[in-house]
Amino acid sequence: MERQLGTVAIRGALLDCVGDPFYEPEFQAVRYIADGLLLLRDGQIEALGTYADLVSRVGDRPLIDHSGQLIIPGLIDTHIHYPQTGMMAAYGEQLLEWLNRYTFPTERKFADPAYARSVAELFLDELLKHGTTTALVFAAVFPASVDAFFEAAEARNLRMISGKVMMDRNAPDYLSDTAQSSYDDSKALIEKWHGRGRLLYAVTPRFAGTSTEAQLRLAARLLDEFPDVYLHTHLSENVSEVTWIQELFPQYAGYLDVYDQTGLVRERSLFAHGVQLTDAEFQRLSEAKAAISFCPTSNLFLGSGLFRLEQAKNPEHPVKVGLGTDVGAGTSFSLLQTTNEAYKVAQLRGQKLSAFKALFLATLGGARALCLDDKLGSFDPGKEADFVVLNPQATPLLALRNEGGIPPTLDALEDLLFSLVILGGDRAVTATYIMGEQAFSNVADHG
Ligand code: GUN
Ligand code: ZN
């Protein structure tokens, strides 16, 4: 009989979040089964438990043995630009100069659908190699750049969110749309792609600096017309940017207020960066249940600043937060590496970011930020079986650091996870599974 796709049993050390460790005791917020078994059916999680308890239910499922390795939910990148894949490591500029000098000329190339498709494939290879299974992705201004991305993601059965950049001022002519054309093109793309398979659409005005008020209002109209699409944009990243936005929109109280008064601050809105947000702006985001993507490698690379994570997670006015790589201003596709930098940003601010808190941001926290926690972010039965296998002894250095292998206690596990974040990066990723099927394996590389 033909094997059912995504109907397998996976053995290994299972670790996921069942709550938010920023608000409850860490050891209550995580679930750890040192010798665990995941039973999958049709790409979804049917059951999880100890190997001893569940082995009798494996039935005719092939059993894939990752004993000695750590299995966590697929990593979720809440902010990234696929057209900027080829321009990472662009030297010497801060945000506004970086956009004009490097970014806009690069994005021009995405007018060519064949080129866009080839970069989309390479981009998705990189995501999977780094254990990222879902991302909220900027495409370019050209509708065909969105088609290219979604076609590539659909062929791999990935849960991806993307959208056409809207930009009707302060950009080169070759990248500019108009308020009306951006509305029409986005609408057609929503009708074509939103909810097709695992794909979802995000209305994507680049940022207030490159949109007229008319364009922002039409973006909000799309959100009214299609209430379950997302809003994805940048917010309060860099000091000069914030000053410039205030000059462009003098009638508004501040940067967030521009988005708010035009109808863009909602539950399914995700704002990248937020480095320069005021306390009142954090409060407003909390009230609106909107989300922030914390992008430490990008914020350090562009010299934007140190994100106030503890203010975002303030229990008095909690804001949903996920992690973003923000490639190409970000310097790595890896959310483990991104966590490494997030830890250092916290240190510079006199704060601590524990490994379990970081795990939350990269998995269940990201899923909550994207309102996808009914489908992603943990191993709860019924969720989609996207997950990552990490090798605690992936390199000679890690083998020395973690010579005991998979530990029995949560204390020791948190230490091991921290070592993977600081020392591991992509080398720690043994395999990535999408809907229960292996989509990346590094075994050949190391074989
Ligand atoms: N603000 C507006 N556009 C961009 C972009 O492409 N990258 C980053 N990091 N910030 C932006
Ligand atoms: Zn960005």
Image: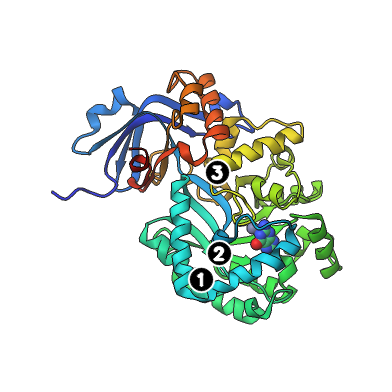
Q: Residue at x 33, y 42 (%)?
A: 444
Looking at the rendered structure, the secondary structure element under dot 3 is: helix
Could you tell me how far apart the alpha carbons at marks 1 and 3 are, in whole angstroms?
25 Å
| Contact between labelled residues 3 and 1, with CB atoms less than 8 Å apart | no
**Number of the label disc, if any, that sits on residue 145:** 1
Ligand 1 is located in which of the four quadrants? bottom right
Disc 3: CA contacts within 10 A as few (<14), some (14-19) or many (>=20): many
In 3D space, how far apart are the residues under numbered discs 2 and 1 (Cα atoms)?
9 Å
Q: Secondary structure at mark 1?
A: helix
- Residue 304 at x, y percent in the picture: 75, 51
Q: Can you name the residue that lies furthest to the left here? A: 1
Tell me how the rendering is colored: rainbow
N-terminal-most mark, 2 or 3: 2
Distance of mark 2 from mark 3, alpha carbons?
19 Å
| Residue position marked by numbered label 3 in the rendering | 335
Residue under the image location 22 percent in, 39 percent down = 61
The image shows residue 64 at horizontal and vertical percentages of 28, 36
Residue at (55%, 24%) from the top-left corner?
Answer: 415
The tally of labels here is 3
Relative height, residue 330 to residue 246 (above, below): above
Mark closer to the chain start, 2 or 1: 2
Residue 146: percent from left, percent from top = 50, 69
Which kind of residue does numbered mark 3 sit on?
A: Leu
Question: Which label number is shown at residue 83?
Answer: 2
